[in-house]
Image (cartoon, rainbow, N blue to C red):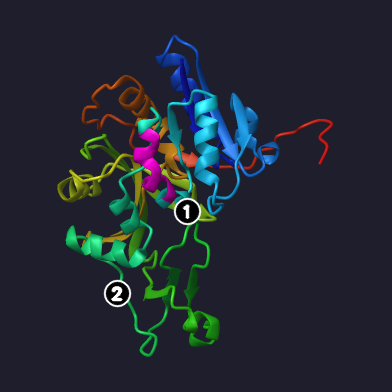
Amino acid sequence: MYYILITSAGRRVSLVQFFKKELNEKFTITSKVFTTDLNPALSTACRISDGSFKLGKFSDSNYMFELLSICKTNEIKLVIPTIDTELLLYANHREAFKKEGIELLVSDLPLVQIFRDKRLTNQFFLEHDFKIPSLLLKNNLTYPLFIKPVDGSSSVNTFKIEHEDQLSKAMLNNEKLLFMQYLGKDEYEEYTIDLYYNHSGALKCIVPRLRIETRSGEINKGITRKNELIPFVKERLGQLEGARGCLTLQVFLHKTNKSVCGIEVNPRFGGGYPLSYLAGANYVQWVLREYLQNESIQWFEDWEENLLLLRHDAEMIVHEFDY
């Protein structure tokens, strides 16, 4: 039997459905997709999984002990984290879980540490021949500019500042905020690129997704593109020590000179990955093949170009719910 666990499942209904579909189609033996959340009863993804468990905040001292207990009690062999704030903790415990026969799908700690700190990420981009937005000194600001935290997630505490009077003292005094050149849509196109790395850190697929519209940091309208970003990324990041599974790379592509500015890397399944999956880049199946069956993954580029994703709100109704 193959039992897997998706943590902090929240609203990630599509990801849970993809794993359930691929397990059912790929494996004839009993397979289940479990989930965790702070409040599973209020999570749509937990509602459609094969079973869910309440798991506290990652900052709780017993978080990993509880996670390990859930995995051992339910014979779970593969754990898929979904939010940035968990990744350092998971990377720190990956080898301990592996000794118990449980695979945490997370990149190695040194790489996760780089991508959780935007200052280190900027250095990473420069070392791999990407451009980055210019960093601005607080005593010499030009407008418009963009502010983001060094360790942020989901676009929380990010601001576009058009004029000086929009700046607060709290912003200026916050040492965790970076002040950067603003890259406008008149000059740049914004892309999230879904990358798949095998367990040896070899890049096996690249899917650029043009971000037409976003909501809370996730793509709301987007389209797959086969363009110059594919050879650009393949040349520079074709082998990345410690990378594992799906990584999402965010870049800005200049419309005329085609220069590429690196923005951030999230070493996990991104919120917009469903578009890549529906285009044929089946990272979900590759994870199952690699980590449950020890199969090799080959380079893949036969995914559908110009596939448009339009997201909408939907409802789930639970009758006689006692809250």
Residue 223 image point, x, y percent: 40, 43
Residue 124 image point, x, y percent: 24, 60
Magenta-colored span: 89-98
- Seen from this angle, which residue lies furthest left? 235
User: Mark 2: which secondary structure?
Assistant: loop
Residue 303 versus residue 318: which sits nearer the camera?
318
CA distance separating discs 1 and 2: 26 Å
Q: Do the residues labelled 1 and 2 touch (CB within 8 Å)?
A: no
Which marked residue is nearer to the observer: mark 1 or mark 2? 1
Residue 29 image point, x, y percent: 45, 10
Residue receiving disc 1: 85
User: Mark 1: which secondary structure?
Assistant: helix
**Relative vertical location of residue 306 with respect to residue 83 in this rendering, above or below:** above
Q: Which mark is residue 134?
A: 2
Of labels 1 and 2, earlier in sequence is: 1
Residue visible at 30% across and 46% down in the picture = 108
**Relative vertical location of residue 31 with respect to residue 299 in this rendering, above or below:** above
> Which quadrant of the figure has residue 78?
top left
Residue visible at 20% across and 48% down in the picture = 237
Residue 89 visible in the snapshot: yes
**Left or right placement of residue 81 versus residue 180 in this view:** right
